[in-house]
Image (cartoon, helix red, strand yellow):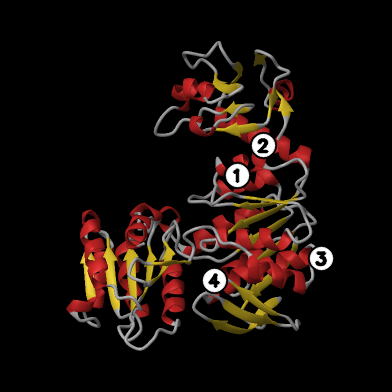
């Protein structure tokens, strides 16, 4: 972005105290990431961002938003007083979005949002100037920050939109007025706050609340909860999945160690993605639908999907320190995601004498169903397929109990949350050069630390 403070002040209904001709070229709420020409947004969280104004100034901030009546207002930097810095940042983002006027693609779903965002951006970049959400910066802070970070020549803005409570996607949809929306699937993520999968589906459909009249909803047609709800909106709809009543469905699927291939109905092209699993093929199908929406050929889409780069820690392969192959999928977790990853992992061929080892951490935000949902994972863990299981965290004790019927004690390992170092030591002593290892858990379990030690 590039705007004078006078324009920013008008956009957020404020007045500039200082030089209103100062040009702002970036926005940041982390004082450590501010740069020369930057506008600092002091947000209130665990800490009050106003307390870091001196850090922001020393790092080059040119101006700051400032909550009215907040003490210690700086006098050595341009200031725009506002009622609430977060709301004003969102208003500025909406103003800048309207000014640049890109086509907006909004993506949500219980699983696969980030991978679908990466695939979709790669597909669209074959023809357009594309800006996408960084990592999974997808909430009421991350979406406006993504908007404010886009270049003025952006033609298509690909936004990942997350939620953990009802009303959140309604707000993000109102902020962005998407032209195309994607719903990847409905799982159990955030069921603690929403109570049921039906309620989760209702909350995910909020992304269409401000879908433009001539817009399009692209959604997983294999999910009845979505089909029921999608039927109620008037905009154009396209479905993807594995059923023959979907608009686009996979007609062939093969998974290898580091990639998967598939074909689709009504196309002669074979598609390859640098990830494994039917769930990632489903994500690719949604990206393919977006590409077709914007007039791209299947050949262009196939080339983009084959070469796209996934965000870190999404089924990412790494090499361990004794030569083992490690699949890191440790950013988030819920029952649907675990089942998909374990199924895909179990289909990988290993040399004779090698083992498949699963390291699973707690799945968070499952509420009063947590114990049952953890224990229920037992039916996707077969000792003949997943030879060793390492379980980590308070809730995983429920799965450990359920697996005792099928796994020998020497192949089933359980650790409490304060025993990470113990688990790492045992893993390092156990893993052999030709083994393959998968790690999956909610981000709050910090299994990335285990991955680092195994590397």
How many residues crowd mark 2 within 10 Å: few (<14), some (14–19), many (20+)? many
Q: Classify residue 91 as left or right of residue 407.
A: right
CA distance for labels 4 and 3: 25 Å
Residue 93 spot, x, y in % from top left? 66, 37
Task: Tell me, yes or no, whether the two marked residues, 1 and 3, touch with CB atoms within 8 Å.
Answer: no
Task: Tell me, yes or no, whether the two marked residues, 4 and 3, touch with CB atoms within 8 Å.
Answer: no
Task: Tell me, yes or no, whether the two marked residues, 1 and 2, touch with CB atoms within 8 Å.
Answer: yes
Looking at the image, residue 173 lies above or below residue 320 = above
CA distance for labels 2 and 4: 34 Å
Residue 449 spot, x, y in % from top left? 34, 55
N-terminal of the two: label 2 or label 4?
2
CA distance for labels 1 and 2: 9 Å
Report which residue position mark 1 lands on: 143
Q: Classify residue 333 as left or right of residue 402.
A: right
Task: Tell me, yes or no, whether the two marked residues, 3 and 2, touch with CB atoms within 8 Å.
Answer: no
Residue 451 spot, x, y in % from top left? 36, 60
Q: Could you tell me which residue is drawn at 49 percent across and 78 percent down?
A: 257
Where is residue 368, by image quadrant?
A: bottom left
How many residues crowd mark 4 within 10 Å: few (<14), some (14–19), many (20+)? many
Report which residue position mark 3 lands on: 295
CA distance for labels 1 and 3: 26 Å
N-terminal of the two: label 4 or label 3?
4
How many residues crowd mark 3 within 10 Å: few (<14), some (14–19), many (20+)? few
Report which residue position mark 4 lands on: 275
Residue 188 spot, x, y in % from top left? 45, 63
Nearer to us: label 1 or label 4 = 4
Report which residue position mark 2 lands on: 93
Q: Could you tell me which residue is drawn at 54 percent across and 58 percent down?
A: 311
N-terminal of the two: label 1 or label 4?
1
Q: Secondary structure at mark 3?
A: loop
Of residue 36 and residue 153, the one placed in the foreground of this image is 36
């Amino acid at each position: 972005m590039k705007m004078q403070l006078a324009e920013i002040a008008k956009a957020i209904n404020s007045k500039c105290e200082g030089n209103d001709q100062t040009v702002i070229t970036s926005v940041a709420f982390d004082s450590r990431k501010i740069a020369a020409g930057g506008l600092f947004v002091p947000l209130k969280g665990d800490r009050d961002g106003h307390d870091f104004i001196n850090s922001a100034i020393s790092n080059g901030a040119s101006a700051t938003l400032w909550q009215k009546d907040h003490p210690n207002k700086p006098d050595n930097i341009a200031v725009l007083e506002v009622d609430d810095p977060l709301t004003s940042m969102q208003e500025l983002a909406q103003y800048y979005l309207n000014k640049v006027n890109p086509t907006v693609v909004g993506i949500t779903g219980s699983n696969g949002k980030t991978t679908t965002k990466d695939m979709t951006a790669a597909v669209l970049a074959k023809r357009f100037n594309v800006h996408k959400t960084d990592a999974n910066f997808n909430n009421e802070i991350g979406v406006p920050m993504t908007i404010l970070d886009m270049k003025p020549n952006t033609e298509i803005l690909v936004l990942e939109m997350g939620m953990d409570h009802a009303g959140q996607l309604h707000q993000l949809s109102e902020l962005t007025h998407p032209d195309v929306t994607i719903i990847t699937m409905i799982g159990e993520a955030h069921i603690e706050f929403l109570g049921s999968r039906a309620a989760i589906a209702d909350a995910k459909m909020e992304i269409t609340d401000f879908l433009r009249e001539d817009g399009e909803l692209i959604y997983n047609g294999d999910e009845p909860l979505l089909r029921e709800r999608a039927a109620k909106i008037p905009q154009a709809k396209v479905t993807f999945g594995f059923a023959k009543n979907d608009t686009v469905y996979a007609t062939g699927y093969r998974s290898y160690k580091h990639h998967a291939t598939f074909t689709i109905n009504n196309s002669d092209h074979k598609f390859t993605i640098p990830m494994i699993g039917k769930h990632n093929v489903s994500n690719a199908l949604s990206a393919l639908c977006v590409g077709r929406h914007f007039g791209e050929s299947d050949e262009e889409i196939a080339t983009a999907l084959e070469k796209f780069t996934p965000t870190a820690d999404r089924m990412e392969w790494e090499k361990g320190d004794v030569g083992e192959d490690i699949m890191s999928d440790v950013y988030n977790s819920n029952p649907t995601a675990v089942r998909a990853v374990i199924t895909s992992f179990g289909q990988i061929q290993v040399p004779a004498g090698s083992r498949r080892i699963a390291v699973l951490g707690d799945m968070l935000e499952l509420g009063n169903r947590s114990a049952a949902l953890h224990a229920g994972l037992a039916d996707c863990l077969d000792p003949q397929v997943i030879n060793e299981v390492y379980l980590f965290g308070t809730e995983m004790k429920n799965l450990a109990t359920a697996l005792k019927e099928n796994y020998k004690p020497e192949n089933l390992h359980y650790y409490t949350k304060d025993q990470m170092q113990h688990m790492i030591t045992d893993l390092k002593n156990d893993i052999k050069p030709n083994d393959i290892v998968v790690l999956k858990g909610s981000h709050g379990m910090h299994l990335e630390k285990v991955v680092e030690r195994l590397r």
